[in-house]
Amino acid sequence: MPYNIITTFVHGYQNLHINLPEKNRPALWRICDNKNQIFSYPFPRNPEDFIALDSFIVGERPLKSAVSFKKLPRFGLTGLIKCGEYIYAGSWNGVYEINANSYELKRIISHRLMNDCHGICISDNMILTVLTCKDTVVFTDLSGSIIQHFTIQNDLTVVENKELTEVDWRFIGKQYRGSIGRWHFNYIQKIGNEIWLTSRNANAFVVIDLHTMKACMRLMSLPTPVLLHDGLEKHGKFYFTSIDGKILIAEDGIKTNKTQQEYVENLHLFDRDLVAKIIRLNETSLKREPNWCRGIDVYQDLIFVTIDGRYDSDLSFGVLVLKENGDIVSHYRLPWKTVGLESEIRFVTGFDICVLEDKNV
């Protein structure tokens, strides 16, 4: 069947001083009826860039204390979700509101608590993001005003850290590879009255009850080490990517009799939380372990994930479509040479993925 897939991607250049905010950069890949489209957008980096693109930006102007980057962050779009007639995508220092029909940029929603946005969520006319380096959930209205923010500490207490607003985090750069923050929350979603966060460092969900403002962990029974990245709930199941080339499908252990073994006597007597099945991509017809795996969506009975694109690897990344039994249905590739000059680029990797139900959108 023909799909309508949109995938955000990020990239960096060999020349770390490239900025040029007036020049649009490729950041969104659409696959529809097996045809490819690449969409480019402006990416303001330094405070003066925000002033130059003032007509696009809503929310908060840079603080007077904000300084320019010594080392520019990556370019591109990150977390991705469709809501109504718009697509919302994160970036280093804002959330892009994009027309879902024309793919034209309408606005960049930005304020001081947006930095290296990973997953994003839209709920009740609010944008939910995470200040990843500070393990902080931020609620923003569609005009760019901060409504609420709270931090999850390492003992799972939930607090409001008012000192965070003294810094304009949009202009704070990540100076090293790897995870940041204690939890490194990658994916955020709202399920009922709860916020579900995927923690890369804990390999688990952290769930915040918005009524009581208390947090707990949702843990998984796993037969092998994993490196969780994104994780979402669909059809009563939980689907995760692991950056080392695995896909996890988890169910609530209280509601299912499934185990990693064929049979367990008196299973109802044991304590357990989520029970996971693992698809190892190197054991599928892909026949190799991808060098990166992040971004996931589930549509009907199919799983969509992005693979490959780490630093110092082949300048391309892909989208895999597969069934829950591990059978690969489709594999799409985006080589950078179809986008720009390979001699200028350092890396390119997919970030998030969204399957649109209407192929005309």
Image (spheres, rainbow, N blue to C red):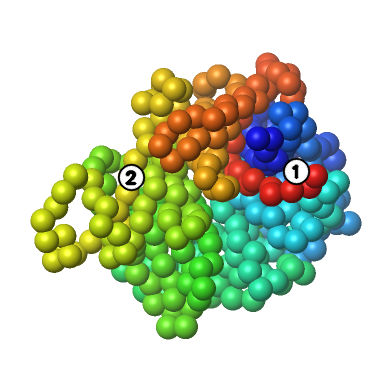
Task: Name the element at disc 2.
Answer: strand
Q: Residues within 10 Å of mark 2 (few under 14, many from 20)?
A: some
Query: Which residue occupies 65% across, 21% down?
Result: 335
Q: Quadrant of the N terminus?
A: top right
Residue designated by label 1: 359
Local secondary structure at mark 1? loop
Residue type beneath disc 2: Lys
Residue under pointer 2: 277
Q: Residue 269 versus residue 88: which sits nearer the camera?
A: 269
Question: Which residue occupies 57% across, 27% down?
Answer: 331
Pick the front one: 323 or 30: 323
Q: Residue at x 70, y 18 (%)?
A: 337
Please state which amino acid type lies under the numbered disc 1.
Lys
Above or below, 88 against 210 in this view is above
Residue at the bottom extreme, as displayed: 212
Depth check: 80 or 22 in front?
80
Q: Is residue 134 above or below residue 69?
A: below
